[in-house]
Amino acid sequence: MAHSAQRLGVAYRPSLFNSASSAGVLLSVAQVGLGLPLVLYAGYGALQGDEPNGVLLLAGTALLVSGAVSAFFRRRMRLPLRHLLLCWMGAVGVLCQAATGSQAVTFTFAWTPGLLALIAFAVVPAAQSVFYPLVFIPLALITLAVHPASNPADVAMSALLMLATGLGLTWFARSAVLAETDELTGIHNFAGFEQVLSAAMRDTAPTEPMSLVRLDINEFALINRRDGLAGGDAAMVAFVAGVCAALPGSATMARMEGDAFAILLPGHTAAQARRLLERVQASVVGFSAGIAAREGAESQSEFFGRAGKALFEAQRVGRGKVITHGGYYASPAAVRDGLRNGEFFLHFQPVVDLATGIAVGAEALVRWQHPTRGLVSPAEFIPLCESSGSIQVLGRWVVHESIAAAAEWRRRRRWDREPVSVSINASARELASVGYSDYVLGECAAVGFPPALVRIEVTETDFGTDSGDVRDNIRKLRAAGVRMSMDDFGTGHSSLSRLTEIDLDVIKIDRSFVSTIDAEHDSPVADLTIKMAMSLGLDVIAEGVETETQAQWLRDRGCQYAQGYLYSRPVPSDDFVEGVLNLRTSNRP
Ligand code: C2E
Ligand code: MG
Ligand code: MG
């Protein structure tokens, strides 16, 4: 356990005073509390007509000054500064002991290390507070013992008392560490995480980015049943080690209970947290996650709760999903307002026949011209709409507008050519909604557009959603001639056997596999996908084709269709008709 805790690099172990300013106030009070008696004592000596003890006077004044400075900068009292001040106080205690020799007051100073241990425990991570009694108690004892006027009986008595105090405080610190640590994995438990979260929220301005992730191992109960409790424990430890290895040093991971975890990512926006999790998912498979980005002055429990809601949503839509909580910006009401105010619009990207360079269809891609955020990419707001549920309203609007646009293309086409299809992206939540297929077919019927020219694109991970409603919708759509595309193929985890089972017509190779192709480099994944699709009798569309080299490479391997900036960026419907469809001269759109 200790081994895993060490390897996991536990970033921050909270202490009692976990916010910078409360620790700052405590340290300031402690310095003044130590400095004031020193100055008074030295002053009293002078009043009595004795020679004033210069060291005590100087040390006391310095402590008063550093106490005042600490009070002033209390909000900046981060960890290294806390250590510095503790060491400074410890050093003053030892110095005063040395300066007073074996006077009665020396024994008072001998107590400072004990006191210091207590303050240390309150202001630095519990595990590190053990350092202070371990270093300062022996140091104080040595100072006492080596003094020429020392009395061995007094030193022995002090040693015993200090040892007892030190041991007691160390035990206290250790049990506090254990109370905040998960026994099996060595990372924080729920209580520890709460401390870290409250410290992080208090120490940073609400405007600084911070994300909270909650994740759950998929079907952990199954692992336990299959491998027994010991096997389950080993899998849990391996999982935690895998995730922690992929996290940045500033992150804190904690085990909430059973197979539920939380990760705090200071300095990360929701989009950055999402990218990070996707990288983690590439090395550690089998978890669903919910992300929430801190919003304004929300409370700790609201923040934690929103990440929990996103996780719940992720688990609802299928295994291995990562969902970002929409916060308050892509709520159903906001999306409805946006639709009413005409803030959403569609762009269309041609799908091109690689052999002829002629457009055979177009994919509808939604855009949001947000009144305060400017033009927002769907990669950012679609996940938010998915988690808030507003995707249902938006998705229906996209279906309506896309089919209306495609019907319009048919009317405006100037020269005779192959019919042009329209591809519409749908998220799992839409496909799982009762009546989705009826809505799509109803829209086709309303404008007289053949369903056979509609393609519904669903990402690979969403295809895995095993719900009866999804299957019903897909069956109905295909029965009417609509073709189903698997989007972003290669980024999910479909097994080969699964591919043969699901109702599918088209595979789209994700652009991450196409972008690696150049004069020197191949793309084994793209190559394999084309071969596999051909043997399964499916169409293949390569996404993100940007160079002629990539297009030629794909053509050579028998890929039929492509999309990408080489042919056209997504453009407004009118530009698609005039600039692509009705362009007779060029071999390319
Ligand atoms: P997608 O369906 O895989 O769409 C392809 C994305 O790749 C689009 O980004 C497109 O602009 C971009 N792209 C196309 N060709 C190239 C290229 O040559 N190079 C590069 N670098 N990128 C290229 P976009 O429009 O930002 O859409 C992002 C994702 O948002 C889409 O990925 C899709 O998953 C989702 N999305 C877009 N519109 C909708 C919608 O109406 N409903 C739903 N549910 N999702 C949508
Ligand atoms: Mg797509
Ligand atoms: Mg795609």
Image (cartoon, helix red, strand yellow):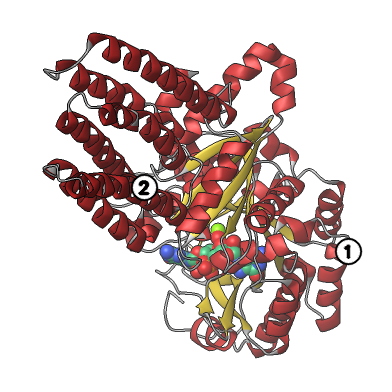
Give the crowd class for mark 1: few <14, some 14-19, many >=20 residues within 10 Å. Answer: some
- Name the residue tied to disc 1: 435
Could you say where residue 512 lies in the image, as x and y percent from the top left? 44, 52
Q: Is 65 left or right of 49, judged from the image as shown? A: right
Q: Is 268 left or right of 148, judged from the image as shown? A: right
**Of 297 and 155, which appears nearest the observer?**
155
Mark closer to the chain start, 1 or 2: 2
Q: Is 405 left or right of 451, judged from the image as shown? A: left
The quarter of the picture where residue 237 lies is: top right
**Of 189 and 425, which appears nearest the observer?**
189
Under 8 Å from ligand 1: the CB of mark 2? no
Q: Is 380 left or right of 503, judged from the image as shown? A: left
**Foreground label between 1 and 2:** 2
Residue at 46%, 53% in the rendered image: 22
- Name the residue tied to disc 2: 33
**Of 82 and 98, which appears nearest the observer?**
98
User: What kind of element bears circle 1?
Assistant: loop
Please name the amino acid that badge 2 sits on.
Gly
| For residue 193, above or below residue 293 | above
Please name the amino acid that badge 1 sits on.
Gly
Residue at 55%, 44% in the rendered image: 195
| For residue 220, above or below residue 404 | above
User: What kind of element bears circle 2?
Assistant: helix
